[in-house]
Image (cartoon, helix red, strand yellow):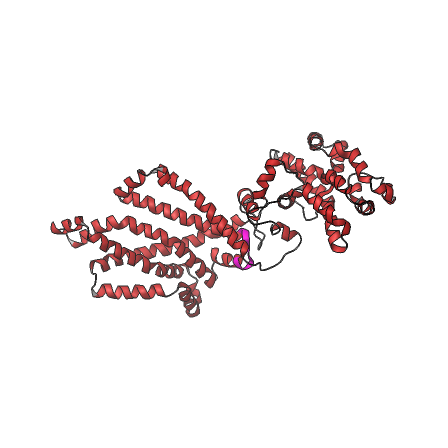
């Protein structure tokens, strides 16, 4: 049995992955409700392709594109690109110098002068050469010759280790300060294995460097990690293997997967709270309501199904079928609206919600039980039991019901997604605490991280319900159990 459960769990992974991709694409294709700009636009990764990126950005590619267009830019566009070059800072100095050589001398001298604040950040106090157009064009090439060795990753790592071992020594602190943003990639590499005390010091160095680079929104460890998720591509250079991987990871879906794995599904665009914490806080309330509703439905449907099957074509059977048809045709949200209008206090109780949900599931479950029992009643062992004089209650409540139990439970697993959907609608209509109001608000705001976490939770709940149904069927029916255990892995 354990091997069967393990096989089922393994075979569910591809299905969940396909569901996640389909759900993400569907959400991404929906028209946005707002058009954020600047940092919010970048944090939502709307500038990236959905599933596949043919030309993923890294630091050399970003700087190359900026330098290709900035000589002809003016106004806001030029200011935006200059600010981006300031944000990349000394980390991109080699690419900056190489790119400047391809710009005509006049625009090159102008851009060199505009980048003077970067020289001050790097501790270059003498910028008088920038006042002379003939010397300004080569200013940054000379700066790279003088400071290039200090900006290399090996030199920065060595300075980091020395600074962490002797923080009172100003030489190492000054060397790290002059390295500007070139310290960021080594710092984040060190953070993977750093201890708590070293982590605080490394994060402080990174935050200070980003403040000097103009990223004033980075104020603590959480905002530092959020900044790095968005802007990491501006500071790294891909190798051949990394560039191939980036075609998948540097997409909206790839970034969501990374956040789901490393950051607990990321942060809600709507509330700014961690998505997984919010979903897990609300989920037990919604699942409990759905579970109670399903239990009540089964508690009524099982005896009702047995009675109508035993008295088929009778008055009770006809009356019950009509009642179940009317109940099933009456939408749950209409019942919630009517209850809210008649008695708002009663409508907001968990008891009423459970009964309303039970009415939603009662009709299909009772009808399935009836048809399954009638099918079982035609089997040879039932005729034999009746011929041997077994009482009707023993035949129907014992042999027939026991053998039909597996199928009845399996049908209940199919009802789980339906009753969860009804629960969410009821919570929204009645303004109850749970997943319902948050899910509707996330859909309205197109909160992709929240909707994806919610969708994956619902898919996982459906998969677990189907697995439990199989296990219960195997426990109740030896024939099903032997069939399941005999399955080969590729048939599971």
Q: Give residue 69's position: percent from left, percent from top.
A: 73, 49
Q: Answer left or right for 306 relative to 349.
A: left
Q: Answer left or right for 177 relative to 302.
A: right
Q: Give residue 413's position: percent from left, percent from top.
A: 36, 51
Up the image or down, 398 lies above or below 307; here it is above
Residue 246 lies within the magenta run: no
Q: Nearer the viewer, residue 449 or 166?
A: 449
Q: How many marks?
A: 0
Q: Is residue 279 visible?
A: no
Residue at position x 53%, y 42% from top? 261
Q: Give residue 100's position: percent from left, percent from top.
A: 77, 42
Q: Quadrant of the C terminus?
A: top left
Up the image or down, 346 lies above or below 169; here it is below
Q: Name which quarter of the figure residue 64 lies in.
A: top right
Q: What segment carries the magenta color? A: 443-449
Residue at position x 26%, y 56% from top? 371
Residue at position x 30%, y 38% from top? 486
Q: Nearer the viewer, residue 466 or 84?
A: 84
**Dominant SS in magenta:** helix
Q: Nearer the viewer, residue 447 or 337?
A: 447
Q: Name which quarter of the figure residue 62 lies in.
A: top right
Q: Quadrant of the N terminus?
A: top left
């Amino acid at each position: 049995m354990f091997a069967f459960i393990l096989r089922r769990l393994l075979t569910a992974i591809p299905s969940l992955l396909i569901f996640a991709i389909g759900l993400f694409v569907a959400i991404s294709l929906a028209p946005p409700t707002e058009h954020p700009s600047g940092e919010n636009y970048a944090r939502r990764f709307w500038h990236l392709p959905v599933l596949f990126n043919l030309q993923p950005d890294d630091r050399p590619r970003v700087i190359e594109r900026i330098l290709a267009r900035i000589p002809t830019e003016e106004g806001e566009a030029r200011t935006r690109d200059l600010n981006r070059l300031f944000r990349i800072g000394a980390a991109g100095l080699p690419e900056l110098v190489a790119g400047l050589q391809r710009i005509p001398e006049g625009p090159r001298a102008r851009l060199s002068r505009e980048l003077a604040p970067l020289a001050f950040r790097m501790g270059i106090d003498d910028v008088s050469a920038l006042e002379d157009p003939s010397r300004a064009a080569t200013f940054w090439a000379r700066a790279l010759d003088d400071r290039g060795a200090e900006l290399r990753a090996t030199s920065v790592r060595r300075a980091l280790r020395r600074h962490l071992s002797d923080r009172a020594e100003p030489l190492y602190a000054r060397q790290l300060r002059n390295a500007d943003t070139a310290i960021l990639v080594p710092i984040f590499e060190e953070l993977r294995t750093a201890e708590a005390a070293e982590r605080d010091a490394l994060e402080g160095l990174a935050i200070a460097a980003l403040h000097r680079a103009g990223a004033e929104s980075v104020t603590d460890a959480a905002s530092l990690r959020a900044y790095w998720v968005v802007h990491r591509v501006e500071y790294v250079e891909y190798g051949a293997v990394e560039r191939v991987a980036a075609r998948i990871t540097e997409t909206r879906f790839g970034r969501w997967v990374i956040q789901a794995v490393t950051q607990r599904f990321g942060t809600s665009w709507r509330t700014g709270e961690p998505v997984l914490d919010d979903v897990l806080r609300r989920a037990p309330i919604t699942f409990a309501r759905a579970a109670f509703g399903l239990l009540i439905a089964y508690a009524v449907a099982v005896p009702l199904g047995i009675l109508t099957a035993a008295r088929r074509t009778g008055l009770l059977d006809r009356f019950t079928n009509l009642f179940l048809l009317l109940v099933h045709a009456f939408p749950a949200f209409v019942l919630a609206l009517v209850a809210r209008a008649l008695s708002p206090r009663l409508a907001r109780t968990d008891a009423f919600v459970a009964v309303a949900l039970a009415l939603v599931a009662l009709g299909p479950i009772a009808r399935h039980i009836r048809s399954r029992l009638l099918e079982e009643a035609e089997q040879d062992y039932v005729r034999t039991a009746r011929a041997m004089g077994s009482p009707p209650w023993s035949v129907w409540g014992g042999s027939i019901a026991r053998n039909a139990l597996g199928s009845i439970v399996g049908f209940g697993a199919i009802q789980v997604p339906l009753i969860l959907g009804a629960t969410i609608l009821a919570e929204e209509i009645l303004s109850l605490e749970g997943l319902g109001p948050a899910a509707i608000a996330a859909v309205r705001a197109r909160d992709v991280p929240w909707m994806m976490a919610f969708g994956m939770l619902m898919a996982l709940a459906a998969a677990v319900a189907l697995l439990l149904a199989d296990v219960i069927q195997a426990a109740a029916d030896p024939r099903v159990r032997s069939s399941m255990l005999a399955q080969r892995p590729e048939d599971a």
